Every structure is written in C-alpha cells, then in structure tokens.
Amino acid sequence: MNDMRVAEARMQQQTDTKISARGVQVHYGDKHALKDVNVDILDKTVTAFIGPSGCGKSTFLRCINRMNDTIDICRVAGRIALDGEDIYDRRVDPVQLRARVGMVFQKPNPFPKSIYDNVAYGPRIHGLARNRAELDEIVEKSLRGAALWNEVKDRLNDPGTGLSGGQQQRLCIARAVATQPEVLLMDEPCSALDPIATGQIEELIDQLRTEFSLVIVTHSMQQAARVSQKTAFFHLGNLVEYGSTEDIFTNPRDPRTESYISGRIG
Ligand SMILES: Nc1ncnc2c1ncn2[C@@H]1O[C@H](COP(=O)(O)OP(=O)(O)OP(=O)(O)O)[C@@H](O)[C@H]1O
C-alpha cells in the first residue's frame, strides 16, 4: 500500500462505529437515570464522557458491558450493539462480553493474588493459552502493553496489592488487556492517582487507542481534552452533545455544554 492508501485506511478505521446505542433508557427503581441516549462510539478512538455529578456517565458506561446486570433494581431498555450485534440479546453471555469489553474502575482493584495471576486470570478462564509458555507470553505482552513490565518483571510472584496505586491501576489495565478486548471502559481511572501516575495512565491510553476503542469517564476537563478525540456531554440523564473533543471544548452548540465547560454548572 502506498502512503496515501495507508493514511486512508487509518482514517477509515477511525470512522468505523464500534458501539452503537439507540434509545437507551435506564431506571433504578423509579429513578429515571438515562433518557433516550443515542450515540455511535468509534473504533480506535478515545471517547470521553463528561458532565456534572449524577448525570448518568457511569450508568451509561456500565450499560456497555452489562455491568448494570449486577444491580437488582436497574432496568435497561433500548439497543446497544457491538459491531452490529445486540449485546442485550438473550444469547449473549455477559462474561464473554466483558472479555471483549473490559473495564477499569476508579479505585485500582487487583485480585488478592500474585502480579502474574492477576494478569493470567482472564486468559485462563477464557482458555486463551494452550500451555504455560503461551500464558507467560500473554502475561508479558499485557504487562508491556500496560507499561508495567520493566517495573515488575523480577517480582511476578509478589502480591498485586503490594504495588503502588499507579502501578496497581496499570496492573488492572494489564488484566483487562490480557483478554484482548475490543473496547476498554474506564471509570475515572486516575481519580485516586497522583499527577505522575496520572500522566503515565494518560500516555498509556493514547498508545492503547491504536489497538482498540476506549471510553473514559472523567471529571477533569483537562484530562478529557488531553486524551480524547471524541467527547460526550451528559446532563440530568440526557446526552446533550457529542462531537469532536475540539468542537465540544472550543465551539459547543448547546448552552448547557457551554456552561459546564466554562465552569458555570458542575
Ligand atoms: N445503584 C444505584 N441505585 C440507585 N440509583 C443509582 C445507582 N447508581 C446510580 N444511581 C443514580 O443514577 C443517577 C446517575 O448516576 P451515575 O453514577 O451514572 O452518575 P455519574 O454522572 O457517573 O455521577 P458521578 O460523576 O458522581 O460519578 C444518579 O441520580 C444516581 O443517584
């Protein structure tokens, strides 16, 4: 392929829809938490969800890998498709789905296991390695992918919980990456981290987007501006505005978005 064709192919990738949401409504009991959300999330792109506390960002993020299934009072309606397939279809196994759509939480939550076993856990339960050598390879590749390998390669049998907060969060990213996800959901992944660890995670996010689609919930507008190419602004359960991060921050169309990004609501 000549340079032009390569550039075109890359552009093509970035406009491919990975997740498509139509008419998504979420209730927690009587509380109507998400109202008719429609959005197409692109492949190999970082999408930031921003908006004031309680506007429904995490609720929508959790819809994308059916984490809300674990909340008894939560009801999800509408359609969310991954590569065109309805993820709420009865035939979809949520455990398999969560291997394809990984998640990293606000607080690093390594399993009480060794560093190695934290990363090997997913590949083991999903049968991704035929033998120990293959598993070792996946663990190393995932830890490298999460920019943690050099710091832990000599202590893979030490407990994951013994790492620093920033290292634990990168371990959780390695654990998610180990099942070769197509989408990685991150719910305020840096809120428990110092600026240096935050910078490392942000750099990592930028590298990972060459491989798959990332969606990040963040309260930091600077972070959204630094790491994302697309931004969705939520307010009171509505997805008010979605577009290129540059447009959302420099030329918002909706007055609610404008008020939020200029600090008048929040
Ligand atoms: N498990 C739950 N049970 C009942 N109500 C919930 C539950 N989780 C969220 N809600 C409600 O749904 C609404 C949206 O919450 P959500 O956590 O999605 O907002 P958010 O935008 O992520 O907020 P924050 O930025 O504070 O994390 C809120 O009114 C919240 O109180």
Image: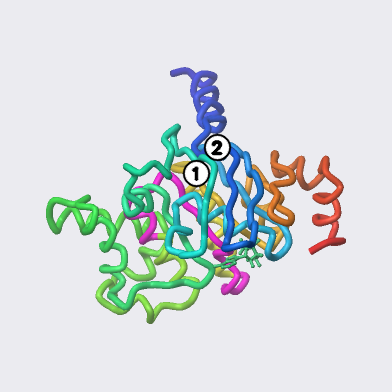
Q: Which residue is mark 1?
A: 213
Residue found farthest to the left: 131
**Residue that numbered label 2 is attached to:** 42
Q: How far from the left and from the top, in percent, is residue 94?
A: 36, 52
The foreground one among 233 and 204 is 233
Q: Are marks 2 and 1 in contact (CB under 8 Å)?
A: yes
Q: Secondary structure at mark 2?
A: strand
Q: Which corner quadrant of the image does residue 131 belong to?
A: bottom left
Neighbour tally class for label 2: few under 14, some 14-19, many 20 plus, Cα within 10 Å: many
Q: Which mark is residue 66?
A: none
Residue at 57% x, 63% y: name it: 29
Q: Is residue 196 above or below residue 50?
A: below
Q: Which residues are magenta?
A: 174-195
Assign the C terminus to one quadrant of the image: bottom right
**Residue 207 location, x and y as percent?**
50, 49
Picture quarter with ligand 1: bottom right
Q: Amino acid at mark 1?
A: Ser
Residue type, mark 2 in image: Leu
Query: Spatial distance from mark 2 to mark 1, Cα to Cα?
Result: 7 Å
Question: Residue lying farthest bottom?
Answer: 162
Q: Is residue 192 magenta?
A: yes
Q: In the displayed structure, would residue 101 be above or below residue 22?
A: below
Is 169 on the left-hand or right-hand side of 196?
Answer: left
Residue at disc 1, secondary structure: strand
Q: Residue furthest front?
A: 30
The disc, 2 or 1, on the residue closer to the chain's N-terminal end is 2
Residue 45 position, x and y percent, is: 55, 41
Say left or right for 132 vs 118: left
Going 43% across and 72% down the picture, which residue do you hit? 109
Q: Nearer the viewer, residue 172 or 49?
A: 49
